Amino acid sequence: MHVPIEPLLNADDIQALQAALRGPQASWVEGALTAGWHAKGVKNNHQLEPGSPLHQELALGLRDALLRHPLVQAVAFPKQVHGVLFSRSRVGEGYGRHVDNAWMAGGRSDLSWTLWLSEPDDYAGGALVLETPAGEESFRLPAGHALLYPSTLLHRVEPVEAGERLVAVGWIQSRIRHGEQRELLFELDTARRALFERSGHDEIFDLISRSYSNLLRRWDD
């Protein structure tokens, strides 16, 4: 299950991030330096230097924003957000077909996320393409919007044809290891919230809440 977060950041936050990433303190390195051995040959972009003070500052803010977002909490059950990277792709750059490593330096990758920092009109090409069981799905979201998707999926970023594509990416280690369990819990939580809005606190709400809580206890990793 992939879920758009619309939006994760507001316009002021995006403007501040864009200014920082295009400012004099931003040091960019080849993206292949942070790719796994099997992805180095297809990763053709640039990333904000991970060890730089600017990267540390910006990454901390994004981790906090993700952990606070109610939809991220409901869908991902985040144990930790890790591996935040800021990526820049210009004409001819992209990221070929690959799957994310099961383990990153910060933890297990259960869910991947991409946060768009450029507006779709700022560049051509550069779509994120997921290979889902239903077929390929392509995404070019507005700045400030994010997409959560299973790290198990093959995916790619099409080459940029014009302009500049700025995004942030990273991973979530979930308290619920298995995706089908996370999906079931999200559906139960959505149903009980809708029931509460319609009927208030009644016996059916209590029964659904009991099942939800007991499944969380059973599946918590």
Image (spheres, helix red, strand yellow):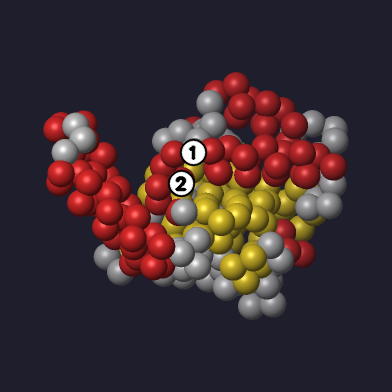
Which residue type carries mark 1?
His
Residue picked out by circle 2: 73
Q: Is residue 141 left or right of residue 26?
A: left
Q: Nearer the viewer, residue 196 or 210?
A: 210
For label 2, count other residues whose C-alpha is less than 10 Å away and answer few (under 14), some (14-19) or many (20+): some
Residue 30 is labelled as none
The answer to whether residue 168 is visible is yes
Image quarter where the N terminus lies is bottom left
Q: Position of residue 82 (x, y in %)?
A: 65, 55
| Dot 2: element | helix
Q: Is residue 150 left or right of residue 98?
A: left
Residue 69 is labelled as 1
Is the C-beta separation of discs 2 and 1 under 8 Å? yes
Q: Residue at x 46, y 46 (%)?
A: 73
For label 1, count other residues whose C-alpha is less than 10 Å away and answer few (under 14), some (14-19) or many (20+): some
Q: Residue at x 67, y 37 (%)?
A: 61
Q: Position of residue 5 (x, y in %)?
A: 43, 41
Q: Nearer the viewer, residue 13 or 215?
A: 215
Which residue type carries mark 2?
Gln
Q: Is residue 120 left or right of residue 28?
A: left
Q: Residue at x 72, y 53 (%)?
A: 46
Q: Position of residue 171 (x, y in %)?
A: 58, 57
Q: Residue at x 54, y 31 (%)?
A: 9
Q: Position of residue 164 (x, y in %)?
A: 62, 41
The answer to whether residue 154 is visible is no
Q: Nearer the viewer, residue 91 or 110?
A: 110
The answer to whether 54 is drawn above or below residue 100 in the figure is: above
